[in-house]
Amino acid sequence: MSHTKVPYLAVPPPPAAAAPAAAYYQDDEPVEEKKPLANNGRGLVLKTHCEFPAIGRGAFRDKFAVLVHARAPADVARAPLDLVTVLDVSGSMKGQKLALLKQAMAFVVDQLGPADRLSVVSFSGRAARLTCLARMSDAGKASAELAVDSLVVGSGTNIGEGLRVGAQVLVGRRLKNSVASMILLSDGQDSRLRANKRYMDLVPPLFVLAGSRPGPIHTFGFGANHDAAALHTIAQATGGTFSFVGNQAAIQDSFAQCIGGLLSVAVQEARIAVTCLHRGVHVQEVKSGCYGNHVDADGRAASIDVGELYDGEERRFLVLVYVPRARPAESVTRLIKVTCGYNDAATGQAANAAAPAAVIQRPLELTDLPHPCMEVERERVRLATTQDIAAAREAAEGGQHASAARILDSRLKAVERSAPGTAGDDPTCEAIKEELRDLSARVGDRREYQQTGRACLLAGMSSHAQQRASAVELQSASKARAYLTPKMEEMVETSREQSRKRGSSSDAGSSQLNKQIKQDLTED
């Protein structure tokens, strides 16, 4: 093994209620010098789909739906990552939980490249930064593995302090990789918030505003006793996802899915612009989930702040417009033009994408009612499902568990009756139906809801709001999963392959040991 000097293990700072600028860590290792990267001309692709292909010339429509579909380029060069992991080592993490966490972190360290940087923070009653933000060279990985292996449990659970120290690392960076994120894992309730439940107090202030935050905080609830509401609030406030790891052995796969995304960011600072073309058309509403949107006062333009997209990741938004009656000689109506400005994450260069204008035919009369666009109907199904998952959670939180189950069962039947639901093997609808069945089984009983249902509902809400995969293990055996990107799937498969090899090695070792014991007994 090389005797290269490894990055030091840092002494934890004294606790403080708020971190002034002087308290930020400014000892991050230099970033690797950027090399010119090429993405072979691949860029973000924009498409539009109109609810119906035609409207009669003498008719008008309120809230006519136009689907805006953005897809990030696939198989492109990636940008290096700055990652801070904030790990709960409270007393409830002792034993197998801590061992599985160390195993999962070893996998994360192994997947990072020499241009990526990692800092490890642990917390119980207090928080400690175990490593500076160091490049994952051989020496950096050795330091990180040593820090992870040294983790021991303590008393208390101070999530806010862990996030404060993690924020000090990311905010204080002297040099920055273009992609940055924090991962928070906790299996318990914050000791200081048990009375007031002011979850936003846990979020570092600079992470709340989209324009100033260093990166999202992706949160993981580990086991049945974590505070799902707190972790969901932290993720939601910072642009991260909340994942529920109910099966402790699945923690490595859950981390792998998240890392698969973070190590494949292709697009940054994406902003979609909508411009009305026909003088009588105006935007009435934009359905964009957790992504901020703005509609001009006159409705003639709108925008959606999309932010980062992973390699091959997709976003769909519904733009609802007013369509006026057509003039006597008007055979088509040009509704909207959609463009997107963004930065290529690997090169840092600004780029633009544009979709063909959204156009509908205007015949004198419609002899046959046209079929609705399946893309638009599929998005409507997804949005209605998202609303009912939130409604079911509200009912369950109020103790109305039977009502919560009925809401989800009713939505399941509606999905099955919908156009995409009756069309056959639609992957989106299959994933939604599987999710609704699973959630319904978890909300009907108070005890089951408290143990797993609340976390599963919140993980689903997080995933649908962002249109990004979060880790949650469903009870059914189907492989249908919403929002997973190919890079996420590849990383999860790498994790599982490693686990299989580790299991085979363990079995072989046990078998050899048993043979040796039998041989020793025979010789005796």
Image (cartoon, grey):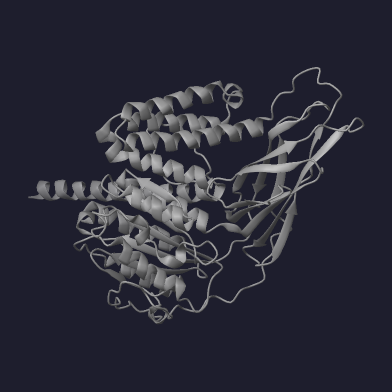
| Relative to 371, 429 lies left or right | left
| Relative to 277, 377 lies left or right | left
**Residue at (43% x, 48% y) in the render:** 497
**Residue at (43% x, 68% y) in the render:** 118
Residue 298 lies, with reference to residue 39, above or below; the image says above
In the rendering, at what x and y percent does residue 243 appear? Answer: 40, 48
In the rendering, at what x and y percent does residue 84 appear? Answer: 41, 66
| Relative to 359, 340 lies left or right | left
**Residue at (32% x, 63% y) in the render:** 160
Residue nearest the viewer, comparing 200 with 159:
200
User: Taking the image as drawn, is residue 135 in sight?
Assistant: no
| Farthest right residue in view | 329
Residue 381 lies, with reference to residue 336, above or below; the image says above
User: Taking the image as drawn, is residue 341 in sight?
Assistant: yes
In the rendering, at what x and y percent does residue 55 appear? Answer: 78, 28
| Relative to 418, 396 lies left or right | left
Residue nearest the viewer, comparing 389 with 136:
389
Residue nearest the viewer, comparing 396 with 7:
396
In the rendering, at what x and y percent does residue 175 appear? Answer: 52, 77
Number of numbered discs visible in the structure rendering: 0
Residue nearest the viewer, comparing 338 with 150:
338
**Residue at (84% x, 21% y) in the render:** 365
Rendered-image quadrant of the N terminus:
bottom left
| Farthest front residue in view | 297
